Image (cartoon, helix red, strand yellow):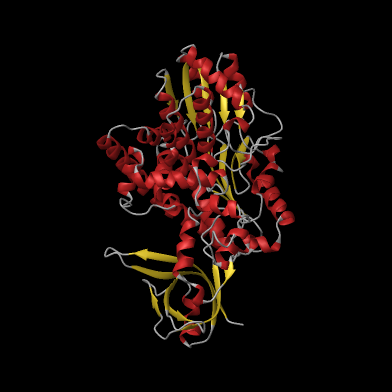
């Protein structure tokens, strides 16, 4: 395998840590091919789903494409709608409102479908728990095809077909697909069944899949890596008009867009539509066919994002204040549960993430309207918060999600008992090491090992994300060259120039929020560092290297 790694043992070690241990696997990892995508008919119920869709089109039935109001749901709806629109016109899309209808399939949407003679609903990124709603739809003569990736229960809805790689007994090779990716597989199967040979028509939609994978923090491994790789290429070369407008607003035009850019810049803007107003606006933008119209729509969504940031900051400060004022009650607890009936429903998921990052504990943030409490939870590395919420489901009206993020609703009077039992479950089941932030190191190297070959090879590991993070290296016994200094408005960061004994080369680095280490470093005492390697390309074409420091400790 060293041949594929250009003889670099460090690169070979990085591949092995990612489960790639053969020359063929290395070639496929470095050059993911569309042909590496799995046969969509390996997914359970795919033949049923395709047959029902073909039947609907043959009978000229009205079809509704339905999805969640977040990034994954809106990109999924846009993808399926755009693709089917090439072949069928009796079709519309529907995104529920977060505040009136809530998460999942709403009764209001089914009534709307019945009034408009819809006979088939393709639901994306939700629906796996909508037993009563789909039963209600069936009574009205409406069939459902569910495309979901959330954890299913033992009892399943009476849909014509359920496409979900997490279904019990599923042998589909890739378990970690986004909801949009499941929609892509459905369209891939539809194309195969109808002998549609224009592959570019479908592959041109992979930019939407890449955005969904990044925003939903789906592991970028196996088939998902292939989709993310080719989707990012599309995002950088010829994205759809809606995404192109967002890219322009994010000032990413003519820049190398990464998964990180999607997570922190593109995704939040698409999400802001469903958080602050209506997810329908996000789909309107993503299916837009006029560049000027798309840019005007994206400006509205950008304003929603600015409003979202203000609310996010305010509610995070209020949440922190609750913890500070009740430090006696919170201290020693292994979980955080916060409730304020006045908090904005669209922001609580973000605030739960902030609490988990700040205090490194599983966190639930709740708000309330009309006696119904709605919450979002986030977890720490290695702790399955879905199992925690599932253990107290008797208190809940509804819940769903993943091991690291779960949404839920309950009657307001159940909040105290929910808090008690959730905290009890976490205290009993969480491991001590899961309450400490850990930095997992890929390889221990010296500065002499940071060669052009290594840097070139690291670029081939893109796209980075969960399951394939930017490699983290450790170098021991590093010294300040004598020119390191404190920077930032409050001198909270350290701009470093470092050397070690393996080479005379001085390497630039930045350590954010690590000012407490400055005195030790400035005294020319040795340190151990872990870091990622970044290369910046400047306007004049030359490139500079910088280490992004993840952690520092005095050398032992």
* Viewer-nearest residue: 332 or 248: 248
Residue at 42%, 19% (x, y): give it.
88
For residue 46, side relative to residue 304 (left or right): right
Q: Residue 456 appears at what percent x and percent y?
A: 45, 63
Residue at 42%, 35% (x, y): give it.
279
Q: Quadrant of residue 284?
A: top left
Looking at the image, the residue that sits furthest to the top is 59
Looking at the image, the residue that sits furthest to the bottom is 523
Q: Residue 529 appears at what percent x and percent y?
A: 53, 74
The quadrant of the rendering that contains the C terminus is bottom right
Examine the rendering and report whether any part of residue 346 can be seen: no
Q: Is residue 362 above or below residue 61?
A: below
* Viewer-nearest residue: 451 or 97: 451
Examine the rendering and report whether any part of residue 263 can be seen: yes
Q: Is residue 308 above or below residue 187?
A: below
For residue 547, side relative to residue 36 (left or right): left
* Viewer-nearest residue: 387 or 208: 208
Residue at 66%, 50% (x, y): give it.
384
Looking at the image, the residue that sits furthest to the front is 3
The quadrant of the rendering that contains the N terminus is bottom right
Looking at the image, the residue that sits furthest to the left is 292
* Viewer-nearest residue: 311 or 271: 271
Q: Residue 247 appears at what percent x and percent y?
A: 34, 47
Disc count in the image? 0
For residue 432, side relative to residue 530 (left or right): right
Q: Residue 177 appears at what percent x and percent y?
A: 56, 41
Q: Is residue 492 above or below residue 279?
A: below
């Amino acid at each position: 395998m060293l041949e594929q790694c250009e003889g670099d043992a460090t690169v070979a070690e990085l591949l092995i840590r990612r489960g790639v241990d053969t020359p063929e696997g290395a070639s496929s990892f470095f050059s993911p091919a569309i042909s590496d995508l799995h046969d969509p008919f390996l997914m359970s119920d795919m033949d049923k789903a395709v047959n029902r869709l073909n039947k609907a089109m043959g009978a000229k039935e009205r079809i509704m494409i339905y999805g969640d109001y977040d990034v994954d749901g809106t990109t999924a709806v846009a993808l399926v709608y755009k693709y089917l629109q090439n072949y069928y016109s009796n079709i519309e899309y529907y995104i529920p409102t977060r505040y009136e209808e809530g998460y999942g399939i709403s009764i209001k949407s089914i009534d709307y479908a019945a009034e408009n003679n819809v006979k088939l609903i393709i639901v994306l990124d939700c629906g796996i728990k909508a037993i009563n709603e789909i039963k209600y739809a069936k009574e009205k003569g409406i069939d459902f095809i569910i495309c979901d990736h959330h954890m299913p229960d033992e009892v399943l809805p009476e849909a014509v077909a359920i496409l979900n790689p997490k279904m019990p007994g599923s042998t589909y090779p890739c378990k970690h697909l986004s909801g949009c990716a499941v929609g892509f597989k459905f369209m891939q199967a539809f194309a195969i069944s109808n002998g549609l040979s224009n592959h570019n028509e479908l592959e041109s939609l992979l930019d939407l899949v890449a955005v969904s994978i990044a925003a939903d923090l789906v592991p970028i491994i196996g088939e998902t890596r292939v989709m993310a790789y080719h989707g990012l290429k599309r995002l950088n070369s010829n994205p759809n008009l809606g995404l192109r407008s967002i890219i322009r607003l994010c000032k990413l035009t003519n820049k190398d867009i990464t998964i990180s850019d999607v997570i922190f810049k593109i995704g939040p803007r698409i999400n802001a539509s469903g958080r602050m107003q209506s997810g329908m606006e996000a789909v309107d933008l993503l299916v837009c066919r006029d560049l000027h119209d798309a840019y005007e729509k994206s400006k509205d969504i950008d304003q929603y994002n600015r409003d979202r940031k203000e609310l996010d900051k305010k509610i995070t400060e209020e949440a922190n204040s609750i913890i500070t004022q009740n430090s006696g009650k919170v201290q020693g607890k292994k979980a955080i549960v916060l409730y304020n009936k006045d908090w904005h429903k669209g922001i609580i998921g973000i605030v739960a993430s902030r609490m988990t990052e700040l205090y490194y504990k599983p966190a639930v943030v709740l708000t309330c309207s009309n006696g119904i409490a709605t919450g979002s939870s986030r977890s720490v590395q290695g702790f399955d918060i879905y199992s925690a919420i599932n253990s107290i489901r008797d208190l809940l009206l509804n819940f769903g999600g993943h091991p690291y993020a779960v949404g839920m609703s309950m009657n307001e009077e159940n909040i105290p008992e929910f808090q008690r039992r959730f905290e009890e479950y976490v205290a009993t089941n969480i491991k001590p090491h899961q309450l400490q932030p850990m930095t997992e190191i890929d390889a221990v190297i010296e500065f002499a090992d940071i060669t052009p070959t290594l840097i070139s090879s690291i670029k081939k590991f893109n796209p980075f994300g969960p399951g394939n993070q930017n490699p983290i290296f450790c170098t021991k016994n590093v010294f300040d060259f004598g020119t390191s200094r404190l920077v930032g408005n409050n001198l909270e960061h350290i701009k470093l120039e470092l050397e070690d004994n393996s080479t005379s080369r001085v390497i630039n680095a930045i350590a954010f929020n690590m000012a407490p280490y400055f005195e030790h470093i400035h005294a020319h005492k040795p340190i151990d560092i872990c870091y990622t390697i970044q290369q910046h390309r400047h306007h004049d074409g030359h490139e500079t290297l910088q280490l992004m420091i993840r952690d520092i400790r005095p050398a032992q």
